[in-house]
Image (spheres, rainbow, N blue to C red):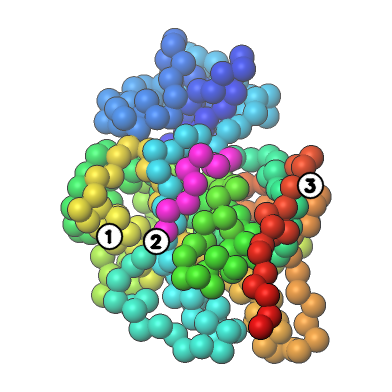
Amino acid sequence: MKLVSFLNRDKGQAGLLMGDNIYELSATPVTMQYILDNWDESIAAIKTVAEMGASGRVSGIPVHAVPLLAPVPHPTSCRDGYAFRQHVASARRNRKVPMTPEFDQYPVFYFTNHNSIIGPGAIKCMPDHFHKLDFELEAAIVICKKGRNIKAAEADQYIGGLMIMNDMSARTLQMEEMLLNLGPAKGKDFATVIGPWLVTLDELQQHETAPKPGHIGKSWNLAMRCWVNEKQVSAGNLADMDWTFAELIERASYGADLYPGDVIGSGTVGTGCFLELNGTGKLNDPDYKEQWLQEGDTVVMEIEGLGRLENKIEREDKEFSILAQKKLTAEK
């Protein structure tokens, strides 16, 4: 099933997407958080709505007639993993540093700003964000029941569904913080895009495939692509994840409670950002011209089975700069 959040009569609510129509889930509008907090009961009710919609007993709302929000508009938290070895290895090669062996020993993640989640539409950026503004092509899951110390072998049952994620990155802000061995923080907290809908695991069964050798959990053979201004810049596959979402859940839940509404991203697929693409280009050609996102650019991401997520880069009407406030150490 495909679940959406949308604006209806100026209020956000959740619905079921079938074909080109959204079906309301009850006489009283419910939110995605309500569905996640009451997952088993809600899924049973949604299946009934699906049957009624398919038989014509209830009418839907044309999907293009209402604004779509992020499927999970207000996550209880948002973590982003580092699960694709190809991306990590390429980025390190481009910096002329060896691949870190720790990548193959355990999965890692960082916390990003769960209050900066957005869906399809405009991405508002401040002036400092345009210093090497980047996209990151990823997938994400949402947790649908509370758990703690969850073993990877059992973790897939905590996944409510999958969706596309664009982990927007302001690279100059990111890199200046990481010189202090902290971050990425300000390089990431202005916008994380998810959408256009949440796809439950039952709808993805035909795409399931074995995880990488030595790993545990579900994996899906889903092609991933990204276009900037209608030019394709990235291509990969969700099955290329080395660490599975189940293994990320095991790591995240160790000594910590996970809650319905927690979002966990996969990390960037190989070729899935300009930082990696620029580094590879310059490694192969010293005259390679770097590319970064600019005001007015359109970013379209597509993952097979998960839909197509489109955003436009817009500039906020503010000239405030924190980069300009850096204090320089006087030369001695």
Q: Is residue 166 left or right of residue 220?
A: right
The image quadrant of residue 224 is bottom right
Q: Give the position of the C terminus as an image quadrant.
A: bottom right
Query: In the image, which is nearer the foreground, mark 3 or mark 2?
Result: 3
Q: Is residue 295 left or right of residue 88?
A: right
Q: Mark 2 and mark 1: span between their CA atoms?
A: 9 Å
Give the answer, above or below, for where 283 lies relative to 185. Answer: below
**In terms of sequence position, does the residue under pointer 2 or pointer 1 come before the other?**
2
Q: Is residue 208 left or right of residue 235?
A: left
113 within the magenta span: yes
Disc 2 target residue: 109
In the depicted view, which residue is nearer to us: 72 or 48?
72
What amino acid does circle 2 point to? Phe
Residue 19 horizontal/vertical position (percent): 57, 33
Give the answer, above or below, for where 53 lies relative to 217. Answer: above
Q: Is residue 304 left or right of residue 214?
A: right
Residue 326 horizontal/vertical position (percent): 66, 62
What amino acid does circle 1 point to? Arg
Disc 3 target residue: 319
What label sits on residue 251 in the rendered view? Answer: 1
Residue 29 horizontal/vertical position (percent): 46, 16
What amino acid does circle 3 point to? Glu
Mark 1, secondary structure of its residue = helix
Looking at the rendering, the stretch of residues picked out in magenta corresponds to 109-118
